[in-house]
């Protein structure tokens, strides 16, 4: 990466910046991209909240349908395994 200079938002002095998110000022040792880090953390928090809300919605669904979908997938896997067993049996 090319080195450039940027003005530190904290001490207002020019310092070398390599373009990284966690680069620090050479004078005051503060993060140069603190606002960007805070924005990314807020976005991650919002994504986590939305994922938890979606999981809560799934948990509120009808338990009968959840059990039924589990049984259907179990029957499907059993059917596939039995077809494979029959093919192997007649192939020998």
Image (tube, grey):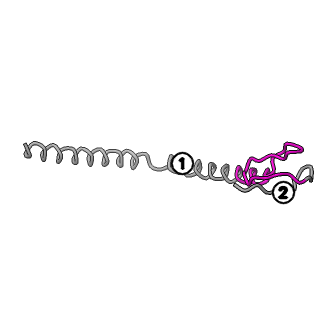
The one nearer the camera, 63 or 70, is 70
What is the crowding at mark 2: few (fewer than 14 residues within 10 Å), some, or many (at least 20)? some
Question: Which residue is more in the foreground, 52 or 45?
Answer: 45
- Nearer the observer: mark 1 or 2; the answer is 2
Residue visible at 62% across and 52% down in the picture: 47
Residue 20 position, x and y percent, is 72, 51
Q: Secondary structure at mark 1?
A: helix
Query: Is-magenta flag for residue 49?
Result: no
Question: x, y percentage for residue 77?
Answer: 27, 46
Please name the residue that numbered disc 2 is placed on.
6
From which residue to which does the magenta span run? 14-41
Q: Secondary structure at mark 2?
A: strand
Left or right relative to 73: residue 29: right
Q: Residue at x 74, y 50 (%)?
A: 37
In front: 52, or 7? 7
- Residue highlighted by disc 1: 55
Looking at the rendered image, the quarter that the N terminus falls into is bottom right
Q: Position of residue 45 (x, y in %)?
A: 67, 49
């Amino acid at each position: 990466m090319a080195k450039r200079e940027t003005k530190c938002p904290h001490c207002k002095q020019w310092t070398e910046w390599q373009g990284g998110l966690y680069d620090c000022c050479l004078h005051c040792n503060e993060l140069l991209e603190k606002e960007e880090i805070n924005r990314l953390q807020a976005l991650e928090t919002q994504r986590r909240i939305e994922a938890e809300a979606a999981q809560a919605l799934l948990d509120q669904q009808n338990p009968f349908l959840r059990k039924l979908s589990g049984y259907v997938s179990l029957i499907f896997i059993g059917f596939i395994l039995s077809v494979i067993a029959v093919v192997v049996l007649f192939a020998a």
